[in-house]
Image (cartoon, rainbow, N blue to C red):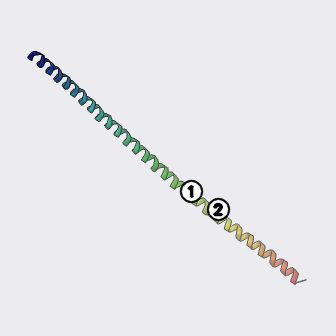
Amino acid sequence: MSADQSTSELTTRDVLIQADRRVSLIEGDVRELREQVDARFNAARRENAEEFARARADLTGFRAEVAAQFATMRAEATAQWRWTIGLLLVSWVSIMGSNLLR
């Protein structure tokens, strides 16, 4: 009877040792997987940050170009407005002068 008990205890111990080894291996695999996932997420974050920085730089340059173009258009519109007012004023003065000198 004691031989059966020692065999069953040995078998139980062997099973528990094997289960412990397997759980340890699974835990190691999970740690490795976690490290790989963290590394990939960190790489993706870095890539996204670089892309966003490039996009911001492009937008800043584009914004400067648009501002320069609007400034040029504003200057042209101001010049055209002055010419229009000048021509209207000259036309009005010539019409009023011709009416007064009649």
Kindly state the secondary structure of the residue where label 1 is placed.
Answer: helix
At which x and y percent is residue 12? 17, 22
Q: Is residue 81 above or below residue 6?
A: below
Q: Are marks 2 and 1 in contact (CB under 8 Å)?
A: no
* Residue at left offset 46%, top offset 49%: 52
Q: Quadrant of the N terminus?
A: top left
| Residue at mark 2 to residue at mark 1: CA–CA distance | 12 Å
Across and down, in percent, residue 89 comes to: 77, 76
Q: Quadrant of residue 44?
A: top left
Left or right of 35 in this view: 68: right
What residue occupies the far left of the structure in this picture?
2
Q: Which mark is residue 15?
A: none
**Residue 86: image x %, image y %?**
74, 73
Pointer 1 residue: 65
Give the residue type that dot 1 points to.
Answer: Glu
Query: Residue at point 15% right, 19% down?
Result: 8
Front one among 9 and 60:
9
Which sits in the foreground, 24 or 82?
A: 24
Residue drawn 32% across and 37% down? Answer: 34
Q: Position of residue 23 (x, y in %)?
A: 25, 29
Note whether 29 is above or below 69 in the view shown: above
Residue pictured at 17% horizontal, 20% vertical:
11
**66 or 49, which lies in front?**
49
Q: Which quadrant of the structure image shows residue 102?
A: bottom right
Locate residue 67 relative to residue 46 in the image: left or right.
right
Three-letter code, disc 2: Met
In the depicted structure, whether residue 92 falls above or below residue 14: below
Answer with left or right where residue 96 lies relative to residue 72. right
Kindly state the secondary structure of the residue where label 2 is placed: helix
Q: Which residue is mark 2?
A: 73
